[in-house]
Image (spheres, helix red, strand yellow):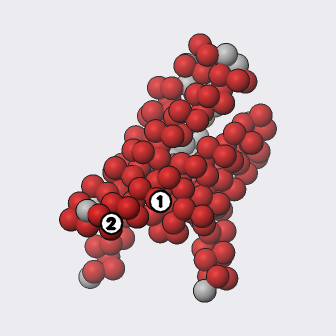
Amino acid sequence: MKTKKLVTAALFAAIICAVTFFPKVPSVNGYLHLGDAVILMAAFVMGPLYGGAAAAIGSALADLISGYVIFVPGTFVIKFLTAAVAALVFSGLKKTAPKLGFVSYILAGIVGEALMVLGYFAYEAVIYDVPGAAAGIVGNLCQAAAGIVVSTLIMITVKNIKKA
């Protein structure tokens, strides 16, 4: 069972890297992508440890390949925390409020992605300065929103396919 989890996490990491790397849209301090959608799906499917590891490795590799080397350490930590916290919130909501259904994906995604936005703000404030970091907030919020919407739609679709 552990081998299956490792292989699935590695597959998620590869997909996260690919979806983060392409297509990407340049933004003020980096680039916008749909990798966060897959990060949230990894969190929902694999939980905090394996989902977090997949998010951290896949996202950091995408930054490395893209030439954003200065972001690799920050991305590794920020994306791990994004996925781990989203997974923990999702798991908690499934246990305490099982009737929420797909809303659990949205709420968990919001909490995880809020950490992503705050994490990059803090990291960029150290790299650049506070005004420079503030310039990236809107792009990160857009990326977060897209990740939440896309991951929720895919998770709902996959659940409905399983039922059929």
Q: Is residue 54 above or below residue 135?
A: below
The answer to whether residue 108 is left or right of residue 22 is left
What's the amino acid at mark 1? Ala
Q: Residue furthest front?
A: 96
Look at 32% across and 57% down and name the residue there.
Answer: 104
Is any part of residue 2 visible from this angle? yes
Q: Which x, y percent locates residue 37?
A: 47, 52
Q: Residue furthest top?
A: 131
Q: Earlier in the sequence, mark 2 or mark 1?
A: 1
Indicate the quadrant containing the N terminus: top left, top right, bottom left or bottom right: bottom right
What secondary structure is marked by label 1?
helix
Look at 46% across and 39% down and name the residue there.
Answer: 114
The residue at which mark 1 appears reads as: 87
The answer to whether residue 63 is left or right of residue 152 is right
What's the amino acid at mark 2? Lys
Q: Residue furthest bottom?
A: 1
Indicate the quadrant containing the C terminus: top left, top right, bottom left or bottom right: bottom left
Q: Which x, y percent locates residue 100?
A: 23, 60
The residue at which mark 2 appears reads as: 94
